[in-house]
Image (cartoon, coloured by chain):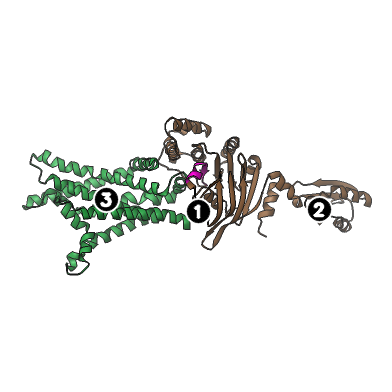
Chain colours: A brown, B green
Amino acid sequence: MIKVDNLTKRFGRHLAVAGADFEVERGEVVGFLGPNGAGKTTTIRMLTGFLPPTSGLARIDGLDVTLQSVEARRRIGYLPESVPLYPDMRVREYLRFRGQLKGLTGDALRQRMDEVVERCGLHEVRRKIIKTLSKGYRQRVGLADALIHAPPLLILDEPTNGLDPNQIRSIRNLIKQLGEAHTILLSTHILSEVEMICDKIVIIDGGKILASDTPANLVSTMRAAGRITVEVRADPAEAANRIAALDQVKKVTHERSRDGWEEFAVLVESGTDGRERLAALSQEEDWPLRTLHRHDATLEDVFVELTRKD
Amino acid sequence: MANILILFRKELRSFFLSPFGWVVLALVSAMQGWSMSTAMKQLQDEASALSLVYRVFHAPPFWFYFLAIFPLITMRLFAEEERAGTLETLLTAPVKTRQLVLGKYLATFCFYIILWIPAYIQFQLFSILTDLPPPFSTGALLGAFLLVALMGAFFIAVGSLASALTSSQIIAGVLTVGILFIHHFLGYITEIYGDRFRAAPLFHYLSSKEHLSYFSQGLIDSRAIVYYLSAAAFCLFLTGHIINHRRWRN
């Protein structure tokens, strides 16, 4: 559905997106993750045809976004980050205007308007003037606009930004439902959102795509970040040395002593599990063992590992 | 084509959805009335070979309010879309930049024509109220209104261009006023320096003041028609390119 090939955008001397590559298959819900200023919005603006790329290629459903821009745009429902609306228009009037611009007329338009008003929970406010609506409702109006022409692809730029927890929940549920019928590219920096909604994650930072995989795969390739906690009764210095001498152990730190028990954090190499060998070691050395726990890496670990600057 | 019509309707409605359009309409018709009564006063004071139409369009208040119309009705056009971010939703819908420019331009032009309806009614009212034959010929009236439409076509295009250049309405408005003032005073060059230099015909050609004096006597000059329409087309062409360029460069 989306195919991005070596996409680059330069603003003067600033390189906003540096040779991004990724793909989104039809029917996938993809989380587009990155810290603020990572190049998410710029990439999205290039995909939607608002900004032309400096170099590289992006295709939507096989259509080049710069050369076949209008055709490509017909296939996209786009919700920009700031949710720009016309404050003086009424909700239905706005949706009618947007529907017409996207090529709907007559009965089809009316039917689609009723559908998106229903779907986005705008029924009570459909006659209100947009400037009187709360942020949550405005977000829904923006979403209704993105949906009005039933596009196969939805591109949502931080759709839950600035909403209260209840509103976030309802928008999130809506996106989840939409994911059943649409391909969705969802930009965000809220990780729990991605974990709940997305099939796949693309992580971008400094204009570069750092990872593109399913959440489960990302977490499992990040096993290095998965720590093991061991608690034994032994001499701390000696135990630390013995554990560090084991294969595939990268680092051992003595966390604390608690009524004679020594707690260590053991970092093992990616893709390995040191628990069995640690248990064997404690048996061999005759150390009483109280805790042996492997911490699963979370998406947050993956994100921090990939995007931290230090 | 359909897109132009949709954008045209939306833009024209937006003039009437906020108090702004109504305020402009009220202001302009008041000024037109003032021009009219000034002209009638002049005719009362002294006999004149020139018609009421000529007098109205040469009354002291005329250029003053006429040039002020354009920044008011055009400064919003693109600057506001840019500032509010709605330019992004417009240009990520299947809409071409030139359709956007034309739709907005035509809507503004249409609103501008509506602004002149009160003046037309005032001229018709003259003979109805005074029971005198109209002190002007139909040709003079049509000629004057034709030139008002032509100048509007050009000046609105200038305003659109200024509005596309910036995301601040104020700057767009000031820029429009500036360009229109310079344009207006270019028309006085031959009056100040005489006709005895080689570029004099050019300044005659550029002078809206001169065109207005011919047209409001019923003399329709096709050169002026070509001048205003081609200048308008050129400004609109630039407007479209600037909107694209601002995105390309950003």
Q: Residue at x 55, y 51 (%)?
A: A41
Q: Position of residue B39 (x, y in %)?
A: 13, 50
User: Is label 1 or label 2 in front?
Assistant: 1
Residues in magenta? A70-80
Q: Position of residue A67 (x, y in %)?
A: 49, 50
The quarter of the rendered structure image containing the N terminus of chain A is top right
Please tell me how many numbered marks the rendered image carries.
3
Q: Is residue B209 above or below residue A31?
A: below
Q: Residue at x 66, y 42 (%)?
A: A195
Q: Is residue A101 above or below residue A237?
A: above
Choose top left, top right, bottom left or bottom right for residue B210: bottom left
The quarter of the rendered structure image containing the C terminus of chain A is bottom right
Q: Is residue A269 left or right of residue B153?
A: right
In the picture of the structure, the residue carrying the numbered disc 2 is A266
User: Is label 1 or label 3 in front?
Assistant: 1
> Mark 3 falls on what kind of element?
helix
In the picture of the structure, the residue carrying the numbered disc 1 is A52
In the image, A86 versus B54, the foreground residue is B54
Q: Are marks 1 and 2 in contact (CB under 8 Å)?
A: no
In the image, B35 versus A205, the foreground residue is A205
As measured in the structure, the alpha-carbon distance from the residue carrying label 1 to the one carrying label 3 is: 34 Å
**Amino acid under label 1?**
Pro
In the picture of the structure, the residue carrying the numbered disc 3 is B152
Crowding near the residue tagged with mark 3, few <14, some 14–19, many ≥20 C-alpha atoms within 10 Å: many
**Amino acid under label 2?**
Val
**Amino acid under label 3?**
Gly
Q: Are marks 1 and 3 on the same chain?
A: no
Q: Residue at x 68, y 53 (%)?
A: A304
Q: Is residue B232 left or right of residue A230?
A: left
